[in-house]
């Protein structure tokens, strides 16, 4: 896992060639685009890997899921304070527990595994239940050979590995789905590939999500994407890990992926940031540093 190689980051991180120069947000100088705002420093869930919005008892909250090896552990975190309000384990089924990203799909929470399988959960009192059995985002057309860094894309246009494979193929690190009110163009969302630094178009087919090799948007180098998220106003954001200096990118014009513009906003994160959530002008990042608790941070960006 890349989180054990943090000391190599400074040697590998260099210029990105994006449309604006990232400005580190740590320290929150007044002239920086993003200011850190008060928030709990950590959540009890181990290895935070993805986050999605949920209203709990009338309050906006974040469901934060753990990485593989933790049996689907989750925490519900208060969006204002960061206080952990609930912990538990998500039911998993055939696809195993390598849940790398979360998103909202109507009243459901959607998870993606690194191999490209989808899980959907309904909220029930004090817990979650599987809405349907796990399913692949398309034909299983890639070898189950995975593991290691997961930062080299497969040859060809294959998109999905077997259910129990990890760090295989495109090595998905996130899934993001736009509110239908803001859906335009061919995609209702994207799947974020760590293996090649792209986000790939997600569509709906026969009531299920499916990923397409094209259209896609190149965001950053292989091995760097940590997550993607839509804000409530329909803007698309992508967060990278420490191998890309924890950058947060805004993807302008995502509804026409072929001409979308990738804008580097700021270096935002703590530890080894993976999970990303956005609401209005507030950006949340959660860190997967290989254990519990998981570090968290929150910024307001101009």
Image (spheres, helix red, strand yellow):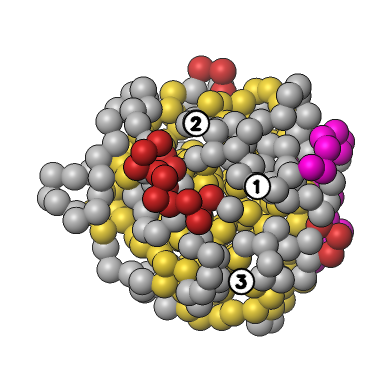
Q: Which residues are magenta?
A: 130-145
State left or right for residue 255 relative to residue 37: right
What x and y, as percent, mark residue 268?
A: 34, 50
**Quarter in which the C terminus is drawn:** top left
Q: Closest to the observer: 47 or 229?
A: 47
Image location of residue 36, percent across then percent down: 26, 58
Cα gap from disc 3 to disc 1, whole angstroms? 25 Å
- Mark 2 or mark 3: which comes first in sequence? 3
Reading the image, the residue beneath label 3 is 74
Disc 2 and disc 3 in contact, CB within 8 angstroms:
no
Residue that badge 2 annotates: 221
Nearer the viewer's eye, disc 2 or disc 1? 1
Asked whether the beta carbons under mark 3 and mark 1 sit within 8 Å of each other, the answer is no
Neighbour tally class for label 1: few under 14, some 14-19, many 20 plus, Cα within 10 Å: few
Q: Does 183 lie within the magenta span?
A: no
Residue at the disc numbered 1: 148
Query: What element does badge 2 sit on?
Result: loop
How crowded is the residue under tag 2: few (<14 C-alpha within 10 Å), some, or many (20+)? some
Q: Is residue 29 left or right of residue 246?
A: left
Left-right relation of 149 to 254:
right
Main SS, magenta region, reads loop
Picture quadrant of residue 263: top left
Q: Label 1's element?
A: loop
Q: Secondary structure beneath disc 3?
A: strand
Residue 81: quadrant of the picture: bottom left
Q: Residue at x 66, y 70 (%)?
A: 70
Residue in front for this viewpoint, 20 or 85: 20
Calculate the distance from the C-alpha at mark 2 to the C-alpha at mark 1: 17 Å
Identify the residue at image location x=70%, y=58%: 98
Farthest top residue in view: 259
């Amino acid at each position: 896992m890349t989180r054990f190689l943090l000391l190599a980051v400074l040697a590998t991180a260099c210029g990105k060639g994006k449309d604006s120069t990232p400005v580190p947000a740590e320290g929150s100088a007044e002239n920086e685009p993003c200011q850190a705002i008060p928030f709990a420093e950590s959540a009890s869930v181990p290895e935070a890997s993805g986050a999605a919005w949920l209203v709990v008892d009338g309050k906006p909250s974040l469901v934060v899921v753990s990485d593989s090896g933790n049996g689907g552990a989750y925490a519900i975190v208060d969006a204002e304070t960061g206080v952990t309000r609930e912990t538990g384990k998500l039911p998993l089924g055939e696809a195993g527990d390598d849940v790398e990203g979360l998103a909202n799909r109507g009243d459901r929470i959607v998870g993606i595994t690194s191999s490209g399988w989808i899980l959907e959960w309904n909220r029930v009192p004090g817990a979650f239940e599987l809405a349907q059995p796990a399913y692949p985002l398309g034909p299983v057309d890639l070898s189950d050979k995975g593991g290691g860094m997961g930062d080299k894309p497969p040859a060809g246009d294959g998109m999905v590995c077997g259910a129990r494979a990890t760090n295989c193929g495109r090595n998905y690190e996130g899934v993001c789905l736009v509110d239908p009110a803001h859906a335009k163009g061919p995609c209702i969302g994207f799947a974020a590939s760590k293996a090649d630094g792209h986000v790939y178009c997600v569509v709906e087919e026969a009531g299920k999500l499916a990923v397409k090799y094209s259209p896609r948007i190149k965001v950053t180098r292989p091995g760097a994407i940590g997550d993607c998220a839509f804000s409530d106003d329909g803007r698309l954001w992508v967060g990278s890990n420490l191998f890309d200096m924890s950058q947060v990118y805004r993807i302008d014009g995502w509804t026409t992926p072929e001409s979308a513009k990738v804008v580097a906003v700021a270096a935002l994160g703590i530890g080894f940031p993976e999970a990303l959530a956005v609401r209005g002008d507030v950006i949340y990042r959660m860190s997967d540093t290989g254990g519990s608790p998981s570090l968290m941070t929150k910024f307001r960006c101009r």
